[in-house]
Amino acid sequence: MSRRYAALMALVVIACELAPEVGPPLTERCVSEDSDTEASVDFDVQIHVGIIMPQCLPCHDPAGEDNTGFLVSGLDLTSVEGLRRGGSTVGADIVRPGDPCESGIIKKVSSGPPFGNRMPFDGPPFLDPTQLRLLADWIAEGAEP
Ligand code: HEC
């Protein structure tokens, strides 16, 4: 192998390592249908304790130590009533029962939110696909408390 060829190969290897991370293909698409019509999502356990408490309440609890999410957007996520009231921008459109894809909360936790940042504000990590599906299914099923 000539020295020039070896140098060229080294360059190719470096260039490949420097290539930008293109990320997942653009197939992320919102689906409004309930993914499992046999089971219903339990708001308290699966949504509030499983998602909101660890990943949203740090900023959306009015009495929390860092309540920037509540201060900036007015969104109080300590209760299902607070969630349904929504924040200063989306208001009650935060949850449209039966229509997750048109619900403000789904748009804000998905990539490319219509305003501001994708939530959680300090992500990544963002909600994983299972959490996103649970939240969407809860809304698809009528968003019962
Ligand atoms: C690190 C702090 C932080 C965390 C954690 C966080 N948020 Fe937020 N949130 C904010 C801030 C700041 C805003 C206002 C700026 C914006 O909209 O991007 C906001 C705004 C919002 C809004 C818009 C409300 C409105 O009507 O203006 C929604 C909806 C929301 N957050 C949902 C969530 C959800 C759901 C989670 C958890 C998955 C979450 N947030 C986690 C800080 C946070």
Image (cartoon, helix red, strand yellow):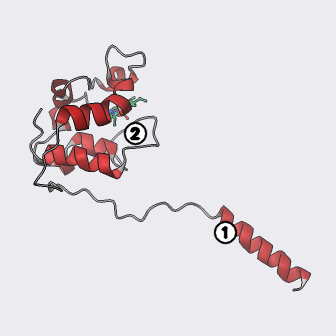
Place of residue 52 in the rendered image (x, y in percent of width and height, measured from the top left): 30, 32
Q: How crowded is mark 2: few (under 14 residues within 10 Å), some or many (20 or more)?
A: some
In the rendered image, is residue 91 in sight?
no
Residue nearer the viewer, 75 or 57: 57
User: Seen from this angle, which residue lies furthest right?
Assistant: 3
Q: Does residue 1 appear left or right of residue 116 in this picture?
A: right
What residue type is disc 1 on? Cys
Measured in 3D between alpha carbons, the distance from the residue under mark 1 to the one under mark 2, in whole angstroms, is 31 Å
Query: Mark number for residue 117?
Result: 2
Instruction: Name the image quarter holding the N terminus.
Output: bottom right
- Quadrant assignment, res 117: top left
Place of residue 15 in the rendered image (x, y in percent of width and height, measured from the top left): 70, 68
The answer to whether mark 2 is within 8 Å of ligand 1 is yes
Residue nearer the viewer, 32 or 104: 32
Q: Residue placed at 18% from the left, 56% from the top?
A: 35
Q: Is mark 1 on a helix, strand or loop?
A: helix
Q: Name the residue that disc number 1 marks.
A: 16
The quadrant of the picture showing ligand 1 is top left
Comparing marks 1 and 2, which lies closer to the viewer? 1
Q: How crowded is mark 1: few (under 14 residues within 10 Å), some or many (20 or more)?
A: few
Place of residue 112 in the rendered image (x, y in percent of width and height, measured from the top left): 36, 49
Q: Does residue 31 appear left or right of residue 61 in this picture?
A: left
Q: Residue placed at 35% from the left, 20% from the top?
A: 71
In the rendered image, is residue 57 in sight?
yes
Place of residue 128 in the rendered image (x, y in percent of width and height, measured from the top left): 37, 48
Residue nearer the viewer, 42 or 98: 42
Question: Which of marks 2 and 1 precedes in the sequence?
Answer: 1
Instruction: Name the image quarter holding the C terminus.
Output: top left
User: Seen from this angle, which residue lies furthest top?
Assistant: 63
Residue nearer the viewer, 29 or 137: 137
Instruction: Tell me if residue 15 comes above or below residue 112 in the rendering.
Output: below
